[in-house]
Each structure stands twice: as C-alpha cells, then as structure tokens.
C-alpha cells in the first residue's frame, strides 16, 4: 500500500529544508546561547535582506531554467552611478531611481540577448557581469566612495518599530509569492521552465515570459543593492562581487531546481538566504577559526542539497500515480 | 529556429568580448632621458580593485615616464591564465623587463620561469613568490613587522586607558600571504599583553567590504563591549564605520566610548579618519618607494648588477602624534588631494 500525500513521512520530507534550518539554528543556539536571542534573530534577518531580495529575482530566472550571473555587477554599477550622483550633490531619490533604472536596463539587455538573439543565458549574463563591473570600475576609478549619512539612515529607519529593510523584503516576497502562485503569469513561468516546447504549443508566449523574468531579476538585484549599500554606507570596487553565487545558493537551498519548473520564493528562497546568513553569523558569534568558515558553509550547503535531492527522489517515488492495466 | 552556425558565432563573439573587457592594455610612452637608453617595461597587475593597487600602478607609470621609459600595461582581473598570456605577450614584444603583481605566491611561478627562459628580468611588486628555482626580485612591505608596530601602538593606547580592552581583528583573504603576515603581526603584538587586550572576534573578510561589515555587526552583537578593532586593510574602514555607527559606538579619540581603531595600507579614507580624529593609527606602505625600487631593480638586472631577491619596504606607522610630520609620505593623503 502506498502512503497518501498527507502521510507523516511525506509531510516530513516536504518540510526537509525547514527541518534542516531548525537543526542548524538549534545547533548554533546550543553552542552559543547568544545566537538564540531576539536581537540576534533580527540582526540575521536584516543582514539576509539583500541576499534574499536578489535571490527572489534569481528564483524567477531559475524557474525558467535560466540563470543570471550579472546580478552582482548590476549592484555595483547601480551603486557606482548613485555614489557619483550623491557625491555630486544630487538628491537621494534621484540616486535611488538611478540604481533601479540600471537594474531594469541590464535586465532588459539580458532579455534581448536571450530572447531575440537566442544566446545561452550563462554566456550573456557572464558577459554583462564583466561589462557591468568594467564600466563601474571606470566610473569609480577604483576608488571607494563614502555615501552620505542619509543612505545609512535608510538602513536604520524603522516604521512602527519594524526595520525598513525587513518591510521591503516583506513587500518583495509577498508580491513575488502572489505573482508566482496566484496569477496566470506565475503559472506560465513554471510551464516555461518545465517544458518550453509544450508551453509554446499551449499558446504561452515564452519569449515574453523569459524577457519578463530577466527584467524582474535585474530590478531585484538593484533593490538588493540599495539595501546592501544602506547597511554598508560605501561603494567599494568589490561591491556585489560573487553575489550571483550567493543568490543561486539561497534559491537552491530553498528547493529551487537549477533545471527549471520547480521552486518557490516563500518559504524556500527566503529560508535559503536566512540559512546562509545564520551560518555566517553563528560562526562569528562562536569566534570560530577563520579557516573553518568556508568549510562549514560549504558542508551545510552540500548537506542541504543532498537532503533536497534525496527528498525529491523519495517524494516522486512515494507520490507516483500508478496506472493499473486490467487484463 | 536559429541557425547553429550563427548561434556558434554569436557565442564566440560574446565570449571574446567577455575575455577582452577585463584585459586592458595600452602603452605609455615618453621621450627618453638624456644619457640612458630608454627601456620598454611590461607592467602586469592582477587587479586594480583597491585604491592601493591603483596608487601603485599610477606610481610606476609616473616614475617610468619621469625616467623616460616606455610602459606596456596589462590587468588580468584575478585570472592567472590571462596574466600568463599577458606576460608571454610582453616577452614576444621583447620587453626589457617585467613588473608583476601576481595573484598569489604559487601560481606566479610558471610566469616567472617563462620570463627566466626568455632572459627577461622580472620584479614582483608587493607580493613575493614562493621559494623555488624560478628567479625573481620582490619588493614588498614587511607586513608582519609593520602590523606588529601598528598594533603595538594601539596596545599602548589601550594601556593608557587603564582598563582591559576586548578586541576584534578583520582578517583579509586567507590565501593572500600579505593578509597572513598582517594577522601574524597582530597576534605577535597582542602576545604578552593579554591582560590589556583580549581578542574576542577574528573575522574573515576575504577582502570583501560586505563580509567585513556583516562580520563586525555580528561580533558587536555577540560582544557589545568590543572597544579595540584592527583591520588588515584600510579599504575595510567604511565597513567598520558603518558597523560602529549602527551600534552607537562611533566616537572620536578622547571621547567616552571611543573604540581604539587601527588599520594597514594608508589609503585616503584612513587619512581622512586620522584627520577627523576617529582612527588611532595605520601602518603605511610606501607605494612610491616600492614603485621606484621595482623600476630600479629592473634597470639594475638589465645592466647585470646584483640585486637582492627581496627588497623590504620598511613602511611607517602614522598616528595622531606624527600625522602632520608624516602625511606628505602617506600615499592616501596624496590621493585625497586629487
């Protein structure tokens, strides 16, 4: 007899990422009681916000079996332009608008190359990574730019006691979740990721869907960049470096497939981003040996991906429908 | 459907663009100085992604121009293979010498051997190579000694306060020998003064400002009484300032709650913070000395003169007491004027 989809075994398997997250939090909590304080929880959440927002955008792209390696470059280029504007005495809203415009423009550029010229997303976005960073380095002349205090205040602002970065994350996640789960556009994204040819045959304008996800990803990268700058208060030549890997890791840790068609922003991607930040924070609180950081972080990611892989195999086996052929 | 050949050509075109963007090459030429034969020197930097490397690059360029030599330049953006190709290109163009900033101490060995095989003198700027049969000259700051001296000054300031301090160190990339030298210099300075300074946080930053900021915020969360911070590079100072401001601990020297703050490099931000009275001290690498020594080493090797394998930049510690006197030697102070 096969278990029902609601049986405890399947429920446990479905919640594997959440269970792993809880296990890591409890482990750090046991080793360092300060890790389990409310202050630390808020600190971890605030620090995870930029990664989580960039990873939300990345999830849209990954769901279509694509990838966007240019997100870190978008963050840097947007930051560089905004920094120049602010240092030149321009108002903060103009600088923020410029960052978002860079994100949308780069997303649109990626979309044109992927959909019109049909070049592999990996190549296109890798090229734009180098172009973006190159242009940003030229703009900054490799100098660090200290942003005015108004930018830092953005990160420290609280509305009704809730930190602004958390409110922005909440709004982004809510919007993304509603779009993906409750709109025809969201369902079409999954359809394109599952089987592009079938999606096309079903009348879905796949090129439009692809273009949209790259623009969304560019926008999210820019927004994540703003919130990261609001914590950092400066644009450095390495700003945004390797963010693409962090975002992809967060999405994959949250259960998004690199092959498209499977994954969710909430709790999946958000959980992945918070998990990555929790490990980094936990290691600092433990005053761990600096050499242990990459080992522990990579080991947890590997375990999470392994658990996810085992879970998917088991789930597909347990929930498989059988067709009985009567003789 | 896209034609496979067209698709292939597009991919090749984009891949070529990708490779070219990170590799900037140009020539700086000027008239030769009277009496000396103008040389052509290839200058290959691994990166220009911090102010220090930009300052070094500009210092070499200006010094070569002043001496009347021609400079071929290349930046490999962290790609060792690309740097190898760039150096081979220099050799093909029959340069008289090469000044190299390698990515690390090991991967540069084949590059040095290629230069040795072509009988082209090669001098490493600020990053030495591992010991091997490959022959090169390295001009480097004494990271260990300079850091130890800087941190010893910070410890003496802590002693003056008459109470125990809790310290955090921001460590650079653990694969960078300079970062390791600075970490060891920090440890050596603290050793024996544990009753004054207790290290409660060792934060790996991978030379990344975001990691530095997040790491320090976390450390301040775990140990809110941290009041002694050393950064292995001044380019992480904005991250420290941001974290201290968030924690309400950013106060000038002499004010209650001031966090003793020290760094290494001597960049423009460090100079500003020294002037503003927030930074206690920083170890300054003498970029102009290092640039001049690199060029002189190439010239001497070309002329068959003996040059030691390692030329040390002694650097100096700049702090509130000697700021006026030493500022003119601080490269960050010069850059801040631009």
Image (tube, coloured by chain):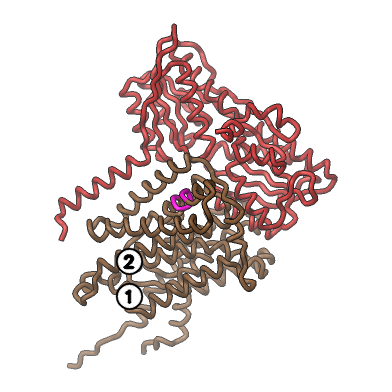
Chain colours: A brown, B red
At x 59% / y 24%, what residue is drawn?
A: B312
Residue A53 in sight here: yes
Q: Mark 1 packing: few (<14 Cα in 10 Å), some, or many (20+)?
A: some
Q: Residue at x 15, y 51 (%)?
A: B5
Pointer 2 residue = A212
The residue positioned 36% from the left and 65% from the top of the image is A62
Task: Give the mark, 1 or 2, whose residue is nearer the N terminus.
Answer: 1
Which chain hosts label 1?
A: A
Regarding residue B120, the answer to whether it shows in the image is no
Foreground pick, B281 / B124: B281
Q: Which residues are magenta?
A: A77-81
Q: Is residue B242 rendered to the left or right of residue A238?
A: right
- The chain under label 2 reads A
On residue A185, which mark appears? 1
Q: Position of residue A120 (x, y in %)?
A: 27, 56
Q: Is residue B197 magenta?
A: no
Q: CA distance from mark 1 to mark 2?
A: 10 Å
Q: Is residue B283 above or below residue A112?
A: above
Q: Would you say the magenta stretch is mainly helix, strand or loop? A: helix
x and y, in percent, of residue B179 in the image: 58, 40
Observer-nearest of B198 and B262: B262
């Amino acid at each position: 007899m096969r278990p029902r989809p609601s049986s405890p075994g399947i429920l446990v398997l479905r919640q594997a990422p959440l269970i792993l997250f809880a296990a890591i939090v409890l482990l750090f909590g046991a080793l360092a009681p300060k890790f389990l304080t409310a202050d630390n929880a808020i600190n971890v959440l605030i620090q995870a916000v930029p990664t989580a927002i960039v990873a939300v955008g990345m999830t849209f792209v990954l769901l279509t079996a694509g990838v966007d390696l240019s997100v870190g470059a978008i963050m840097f280029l947007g930051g560089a332009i905004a920094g120049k504007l602010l240092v030149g005495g321009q108002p903060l809203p103009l600088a923020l608008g410029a960052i978002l415009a860079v994100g949308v423009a780069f997303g649109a550029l990626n979309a044109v190359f992927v959909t019109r010229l049909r070049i592999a997303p990996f190549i296109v976005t890798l090229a734009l990574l180098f172009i973006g960073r190159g242009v940003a380095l030229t703009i900054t002349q490799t100098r660090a730019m200290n942003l005015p205090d108004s930018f830092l205040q953005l990160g420290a602002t609280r509305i009704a006691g809730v930190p602004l970065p958390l409110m922005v994350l909440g709004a982004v996640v809510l919007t993304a979740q509603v779009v993906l789960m409750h709109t025809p556009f969201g369902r079409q994204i999954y359809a394109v990721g599952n089987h592009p040819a079938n999606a096309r045959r079903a009348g879905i304008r796949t090129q439009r869907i692809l273009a949209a996800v790259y623009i969304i990803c560019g926008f999210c990268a820019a927004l994540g960049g703003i919130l990261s700058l609001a914590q950092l208060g400066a644009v450095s030549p390495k700003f945004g470096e390797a963010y693409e890997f962090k975002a992809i890791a967060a999405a994959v840790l949250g259960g998004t497939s690199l092959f498209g068609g499977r994954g969710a922003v909430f709790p999946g991607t958000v959980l992945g981003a918070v998990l990555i930040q929790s490990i980094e924070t936990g290691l600092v609180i433990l005053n761990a040996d600096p050499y242990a950081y990459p080992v522990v972080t990579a080991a947890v990611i590997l375990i999470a991906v392994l658990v996810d892989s085992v879970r998917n195999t088991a789930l597909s086996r347990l929930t498989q429908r059988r067709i009985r052929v009567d003789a | 459907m896209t034609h496979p050949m067209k698709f292939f050509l597009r991919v090749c075109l984009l891949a070529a663009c990708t490779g070219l963007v990170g590799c900037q090459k140009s020539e700086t030429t000027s008239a030769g100085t009277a009496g000396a034969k103008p040389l052509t020197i290839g200058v290959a930097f691994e990166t220009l992604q911090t102010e220090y490397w930009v300052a070094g690059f500009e210092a070499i360029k200006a010094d070569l121009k002043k001496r009347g030599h021609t400079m071929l330049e290349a930046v490999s953006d962290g790609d060792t293979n690309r740097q190898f190709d760039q150096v081979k290109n220099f050799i093909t163009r029959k340069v008289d010498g090469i000044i190299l900033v390698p990515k690390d101490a090991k991967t540069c060995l084949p590059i040095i051997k290629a230069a040795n095989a072509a009988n082209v003198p090669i001098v490493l700027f600020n990053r030495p190579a591992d010991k091997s049969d490959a022959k090169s000259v390295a001009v480097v700051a004494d990271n260990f000694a300079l850091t130890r001296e800087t941190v010893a000054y910070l410890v003496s300031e802590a002693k003056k306060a008459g109470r125990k301090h809790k310290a955090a160190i921001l460590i650079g990339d653990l694969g960078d020998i300079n970062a390791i030298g600075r970490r060891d210099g920090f440890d050596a300075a603290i050793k024996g003064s544990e009753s004054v300074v207790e290290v409660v946080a060792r934060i790996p930053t991978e030379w990344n400002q975001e990691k530095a900021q997040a790491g320090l915020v976390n450390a301040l969360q775990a140990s809110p009484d941290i009041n002694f911070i050393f950064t292995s590079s001044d380019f992480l100072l904005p991250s420290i300032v941001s974290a201290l401001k968030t924690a309400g601990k950013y106060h000038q020297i002499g004010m209650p709650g001031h966090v003793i703050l020290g760094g290494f490099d001597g960049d423009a931000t460090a100079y500003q913070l020294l002037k503003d009275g927030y930074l206690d001290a920083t170890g300054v690498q003498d970029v102009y000395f290092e640039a001049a020594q690199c060029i002189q080493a190439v010239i001497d090797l070309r002329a068959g003169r003996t040059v030691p394998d390692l030329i040390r930049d002694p650097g100096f510690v700049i702090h509130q007491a000697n700021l006026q006197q030493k500022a003119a030697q601080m490269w960050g102070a010069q850059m801040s004027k631009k």
